[in-house]
Amino acid sequence: MITDISPIDGRYASKVTPLTECFSEYALLKNRVKVEIMWLLALCKESGIPECRVVTSQEEAQLRAIVSDFTPAEAEKVKKIEAVTNHDVKAVEYYLKEQIDGTSLADLSEFIHFACTSEDINNLSHALMLKDGTAALSPLQEQIIVTLKGLAVEFKDVSMLARTHGQTASPTTIGKELAVFAARLQKQSNCIARVELLGKLNGAVGNFNAHLSAYPQVDWPQLAKDVIEEELGLVQNLFTTQIEPHDYMAELFDAMARWNTILTDLNRDLWTYISMAYFGQKTVAGEIGSSTMPHKVNPIDFENSEGNCGLANALFGHLSAKLPISRLQRDLTDSTVLRNMGVGFGYSMIAYHSTIKGLSKLKLNEQNLADDLDNAWEVMAEPIQTVMRKAGIEKPYEKLKELTRGQKIDSETIRQFVEGLALTDEDKQRLQEMTPTSYVGMAAQIVDLLD
């Protein structure tokens, strides 16, 4: 809406639509409902809890339908209850009791939320939200990596003057430089995928106190593990206080931030290549680059992506630094912070869409690349002095430094210098045939090593 405060929910809402199913208030409530129902079904199947009887297949289907049929309209019912209770998790408990009231399941009402603390429900819900959120971002991350790999292969033989410290340096290829980013991003994607999403279902301080007071013979850790791992697809953490310590969240957010940092590095390099006219940009009919300069086609996609990566990482950085800290067995400072997980994911998703769009508009300008190389014969000082070292010529680095540093060098200057060196005919010929365009080492072969 035009009155939304956050651009995620306003200007960029259409770009983050998939995340509403992951991080909205509705998504949180639906996951809470799911956790409560899965816990109730586990209690019903535990022979050591006879009072929580076995349900029929029809009754189990009825309970699972509460989860599958949970819509935003149902979530509003929970919020109305919360307006009275002023407790969000208790509101879910009361909502579920209303759902089974008057049915054959009514006798199980007091086993809803049995022996649970609110954090038992919340920590698992948040883990499920992160599971869905990373799954929503992963295809966009993969699309960027695949696109970069494709461009790397396409341009693996296109020579480019490298610049270290912003100064002319040994040539490389466009493809190899893009391959570096593809490999870096892939490594961080692997790190994200390796983070185990943890969960607890062990009561008020993590010891199954209430559970054992009622049913001391039940293997509560195993029962909880079955729900956490088999039903929810998470990993049990038994070493908790009232809260799951959130260390895994910090790992995930740090990995996400590294991914975004590398993407920022890519955005800035591509922005610079565009400013150097190594790349042009495909024009889009009707688009305006400047309100006063008609000729402009600005690299706005990479700029937009960079800005949104920064916003995402500001959130991820705070989440990572704050969430693993909780006073004694629990304080509430994590609660309001956790509600902003989706904001970091939202800004990340906006950034990814922008980079994807920017990559699709790139047009390689090979003539500009070739001209730059032809105007940078000074870079041939490196191979020449290296061969001079091989030949045992005294002070080769110093001699090339004197010849090239701060000087305008062309092909003839290099030819004459090489001709006067005491080198074998083979070495001399190889250096004479070498040009800034051909002096790219194993750049193309390195691209071929991409997975």
Image (tube, grey):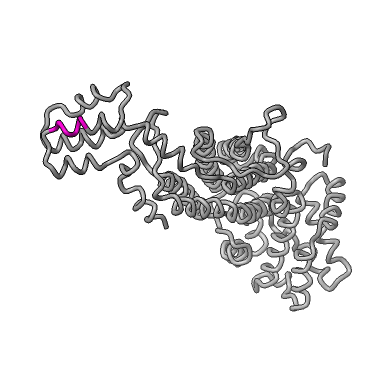
Image quadrant assignment for residue 350: top right
Q: Residue furthest bottom?
A: 57
Q: Nearer the viewer, residue 104 or 393?
A: 393
Of helix, strand and loop, which mostly describes the magenta segment? helix
Residue plotted at (78% across, 77% down): 58
Image quadrant assignment for residue 345: top right
Residue 200 showing in the rendered view: no
Residue plotted at (35% across, 39% down): 171
* Percent of width and height locating residue 150: 49, 54
Q: Nearer the viewer, residue 253 or 374?
A: 374
Q: Residue furthest right?
A: 102
Q: Which residues are magenta?
A: 416-421
Q: Is 216 situated left or right of 33 in this image?
A: left
Residue plotted at (85% across, 56% down): 73
Residue plotted at (34% across, 53% down): 445
**Quadrant of the drawing holding the C terminus:** bottom left
Q: Residue furthest front?
A: 412
Q: Nearer the viewer, residue 428 or 307?
A: 428
**Quadrant of the drawing holding the N terminus:** top right
Q: Is 249 situated left or right of 336 in this image?
A: left
- Total numbered labels placed on residues in the image: 0
Q: Is 434 situated left or right of 273 in this image?
A: left
Residue 271 showing in the rendered view: yes
* Percent of width and height locating residue 48: 64, 71
* Percent of width and height locating residue 192: 52, 51
* Percent of width and height locating residue 87: 79, 46
Magenta region includes residue 2: no
Q: Nearer the viewer, residue 337 or 428?
A: 428
Magenta region includes residue 418: yes
Image quadrant assignment for residue 40: bottom right
